[in-house]
Image: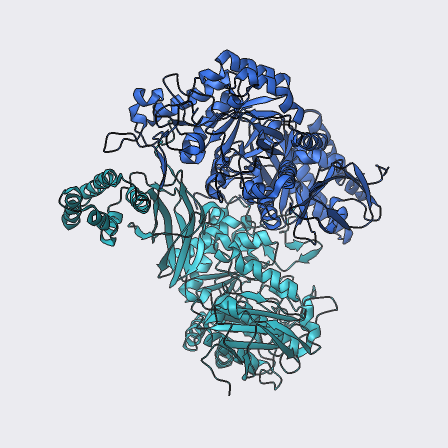
Chain colours: A blue, B cyan
Amino acid sequence: MESVEGNERIVIDGVYPEIDDGRFPAKSISGDTVTIEADIFADGHDALSACLLYRKENETIWTEVPMQLLVNDRWRGSFLVSEPGRYLYTLTAWVDSFRTWRQDLKKRIEAKHKDLPMHLAIGVRIIGEAAGRASGADSKALRKWVDILKSERVEQKDKLKLVMSDEVSGLMAKYADRSSAVTYPKKLTISVDREKTRFSAWYEMFPRSCAGKPGRHGTFRDCEDRLPYIAGMGFDVLYFPPIHPIGHTNRKGKNNTVTARDGDPGTPWAIGSEEGGHKSIHPQLGTLEDFKHLVTKAQEYGIEVALDIAFQCSPDHPYVKEHPEWFRWRPDGTVQYAENPPKKYQDIYPLNFETENWRELWEELKNVVFFWAEQGVRIFRVDNPHTKPFHFWEWLIAEVKKDYPEAIFLAEAFTRPKIMYRLAKLGFTQSYTYFTWRNNKQELTEYLTELTQTELRDFFRPNFWPNTPDILHEYLQTGGRPAFMARLVLAATLSASYGIYGPAFELMDNTPREPGSEEYLNSEKYEIKHRDIGRKDSLKDFITHVNNIRRENAALQNDRNLWFNATDNENLICYSKHTDDLASIILVVVNLNPHNTCSGRINVPIKAWGLDLGQPCQAHDLLSNAHYTWHEEWNWMEIDPDICPAYIFRITQNQEKPE
Amino acid sequence: MESVEGNERIVIDGVYPEIDDGRFPAKSISGDTVTIEADIFADGHDALSACLLYRKENETIWTEVPMQLLVNDRWRGSFLVSEPGRYLYTLTAWVDSFRTWRQDLKKRIEAKHKDLPMHLAIGVRIIGEAAGRASGADSKALRKWVDILKSERVEQKDKLKLVMSDEVSGLMAKYADRSSAVTYPKKLTISVDREKTRFSAWYEMFPRSCAGKPGRHGTFRDCEDRLPYIAGMGFDVLYFPPIHPIGHTNRKGKNNTVTARDGDPGTPWAIGSEEGGHKSIHPQLGTLEDFKHLVTKAQEYGIEVALDIAFQCSPDHPYVKEHPEWFRWRPDGTVQYAENPPKKYQDIYPLNFETENWRELWEELKNVVFFWAEQGVRIFRVDNPHTKPFHFWEWLIAEVKKDYPEAIFLAEAFTRPKIMYRLAKLGFTQSYTYFTWRNNKQELTEYLTELTQTELRDFFRPNFWPNTPDILHEYLQTGGRPAFMARLVLAATLSASYGIYGPAFELMDNTPREPGSEEYLNSEKYEIKHRDIGRKDSLKDFITHVNNIRRENAALQNDRNLWFNATDNENLICYSKHTDDLASIILVVVNLNPHNTCSGRINVPIKAWGLDLGQPCQAHDLLSNAHYTWHEEWNWMEIDPDICPAYIFRITQNQEKPE
């Protein structure tokens, strides 16, 4: 009995969000209102009051917000997170003797009980105690009410009117007896990121392939010339594969052959040579000054440069000589190269995180990230984070965010779901997903429902990629232009953050290395490309159009409001997104069959959105600029993929008139 | 970095069962095998090994059980809980260097790699280290294998065969390198109860109404005479409303009238008079010796006597004078009686658990339970536990179970769901439910699915009551004999624990105090009844039949295997239960419409049970003793409620021949 408090009557649990019992922060975006819910109840029938408490992590004063009772003992409160960083929150609740007394008194009055004077005397006691807790004018007001209630000259009906007044309950709430208050034992965390973590369009490009003329190694200067093209399409993140010196030993040749021929540039992920390691720049790309110039220039175009964090070394990396203890040595005196038996990557040495010198290793890798942050880089795409310890990432990201709360880390982990979700929990800002392998209606619906309508949405922020240098999906290999268009629309409208690997995407590269492979033939990973980005059949204009639609329609800048709508054709997928205020409602229909015209009926959830079913809806297809009027929730449509495999309707009611 | 371990790579989470982060124990039954699951994974691709650790709470040595990897990083292990009490469990897992090496070696062999000798050398190192951890014969064996692997005279293929052998992997598992082991930080608890908590049939009866002759106050001796009748129907718990002296002040009269007439016996829940309180017996029932004699006699019939724990007092209870500080005093100098405005219960004073002397109050209430436990009572039905503090019950039940691990507490809380579930979590062995108000197919399906197929089933054990002295549902008021039969079958087959309030139930009392009320007219709560339990139309034989079916069919003794099956008639509800080994399969169909014959097709889940769809099924209706043969999963049936509103089929395949 010693360890319990006999007068502790309140239970607070089922707190939402609370990731893994509060072990990890939930995520939010600066400027958002965070809503917290909890089950709060006590024994018996007394009225409770509850407050949400929050503060920035580095502040000391808690701000209190009253919570509202919803139904079934569920309470809700919310607060604004105004800037990036960490916020703490917790909850407190108490048995509210005044409100209990007042609610019972109301029932007694209705039931015409005779003993109201005695119950008013109980109220006098409760208000008198509040007066003792108050001071100044408040105390004076409370004492005055006590006098009125005690006065024999005041009629009972006036006394009852007084205690039921908002004035009294307002002041009584302010000076409530909180001696029974129970405070939730955990301080939970919300990690707040900047707006770009929710809404961004990425463009991945190999800088070495950007030269104006064929036969030349591209440079950062060439990348600058490419900026108008990229910004013109509407992208706001430009992501480069590693820009560091590339190793010579065991360098891979064209199409990943084991022996490079003379002049083969090697893969940028084989990092490090006598020219330097993770803090150096591959000399053929330019100098650090060139890089910083590019970063600044990109900013002028509204573009942020994102770098690749690939913590692995070529055999020629300076670390191998300077820190042999950071690698795994084999009985034959060689370093263990990267393997996933039977696959071998002889040009890459993994770092041995099980080294006894892990502290030095961690510090050095942190220095790498800080080095690039100091050059102005704030976005990092992290290569294969799932092959390094979880604790390492949790520590590293926290360290970086202390100095750079606006830093963004995108986890490139294509592995088992629980590992991907763990990485997101421990701090990665965004994550690659299985989107690339989710192509039919059922796959897309199930996966997106999991991502956007379960607890995942509180810590896992998807970034959708229809292609990457590693993945050319069969759907793109075989579906022609409509497949590229459909996958672009899906990525760009299902997920507020998405990216493409270009110019392979807009030029619709679709030849695999061999049948059944997801690797590109003559992959840019192993050779320098020179592409005609002005090609007439490029998807550039279509991409520009879609990115403009994303920017102009707030509904597409968030994933939480995604809902799938029924269609009666398995090739037609239909979903909608809307803002809470319904100012922006977008309905997307995509024909997933790139080969055939498909038609069917689509369920338009007019009522579920909160619109008036009795009024017609205006549907404006932003892709074709066609206007429709819908009178019912089921509407027939037909999609010829050779014209355009998708509709992106903006929905309004009584506002927009058809032409 | 100080607080983390760089070499800690493993994550253990998503442990099941784990009630509220381990704050509360999960429940099990002695003799059961408890299955524990968890997500266990690490970075990278290394092989892991995991063990489940368990022990009885009062023991110190953990027993280790290897866990098996299912899919998607989910692991499972199990252990037997052989006796009532508390068991602790936790988990440990490590990166298994031998198994990792062996699984990679296998792939290297298949890929015909040339560097196998070098990899065998790595194996020699791993096995040599294990030899260092082993001792005696094991160490010797391991060293011998090291020698073989090192020997130049042994062919490589024989070396490979050796390291792939079960013998080597067995010994390597025993001496695994656990330096990377991560142990789950929580010790979780399983609270193990005796078999009766899962499977029991309760009979509630007012002892004062048991007199052989009208006009006489029933006694414990009369109750003894009633034992053959109760045992004959198949009940194994006999529950009495409070047996203590009843107060005089403000005693309620017939039908809960405010003023009792002379001779009105008062309600047994108005506990305490000058004749004593919660440790005393109402003199007209007999003596403590009589009570103990009854308890012993009941045991001979296989019946346990359950008492009512109603922690409240009549104004005449000795506590009121001895401990005025345990009550709430009003400004007019009177004690606050029980109220739920506008309702008033002037004959009952609630205890004030907010008293500063709560420690003494708690101790005294504990003494009450111990007093009755010392008289041989092990089952307690607790009246309105939701109006007393949660901490009190958690403490009280734990205290009692320390001395009486076989004690059973049934929570009579008809209140909001989260409060009911909290009471179950904190220690109540069984709980009253909303079953009484779940009458149509959708209500029953949804409620039972929640109870049996969600996490609830790990801590909330339902006990279903078609009627109680407080609740005569409209369905019984209006549905006649078929309604009583249907509700009995539902209670007795949906829930392994159920009870009826008799003889009101078997004699089909169905007149409410007034229209719209769930109170009985001339309720036994306020007067003594004399009933003709031998009445010809009694449901006694039907109840006997149903209870026999429950005893003879193991499927009905558990709730976890409850599945609802589709029917094409909203009045026909169909569900099944089966044992894991399929030795017992029961399919129940009930016509929920007590007024009309209903027919329809029923889905019999032959395939889902694991039976052979190609073979006919034998269905033996245990109520009518009719036999059917089903060749398909959809079968038509018709139910005339005036004959019998239910089928209880025993399902077999290739064993039982139709007559």
Q: Nearer the viewer, residue A559 or A220?
A: A220
**Quarter of the image where the N terminus of chain B is located:** top left
Query: Number of numbered discs present?
Result: 0
Which image quadrant is residue B590 in?
bottom right
In screen coordinates, is B610 left or right of B53? Answer: right
| Residue furthest top as drawn | A289
**Residue at the spot 52% in from the left edge and 31% down from the top edge:** A410
Spot occupied by residue A53 in the image (x, y as percentages of width and height): 59, 32
Specify whether residue B302 is in view. yes
Specify whether residue B239 is in view. no
Vertical relation: B56 (above or below) A293: below
Spot occupied by residue B204 in the image (x, y as percentages of width and height): 55, 71
In screen coordinates, is A142 left or right of B325? Answer: right
**Residue at the spot 62% in from the left edge and 65% down from the top edge:** B436
Spot occupied by residue A457 in the image (x, y as percentages of width and height): 58, 39
Q: Nearer the viewer, residue B6 or A567?
A: A567
**Residue at the spot 35% in from the left edge and 45% down from the top edge:** B48
Vertical relation: B222 (above or below) A522: below
Q: Nearer the viewer, residue A623 or A117?
A: A623
Which image quadrant is residue A236 in?
top right
Which image quadrant is residue B166 in?
bottom left
| Residue furthest bottom as drawn | B659
In screen coordinates, is B133 left or right of B311? Answer: left
Spot occupied by residue A73 in the image (x, y as percentages of width and height): 62, 47
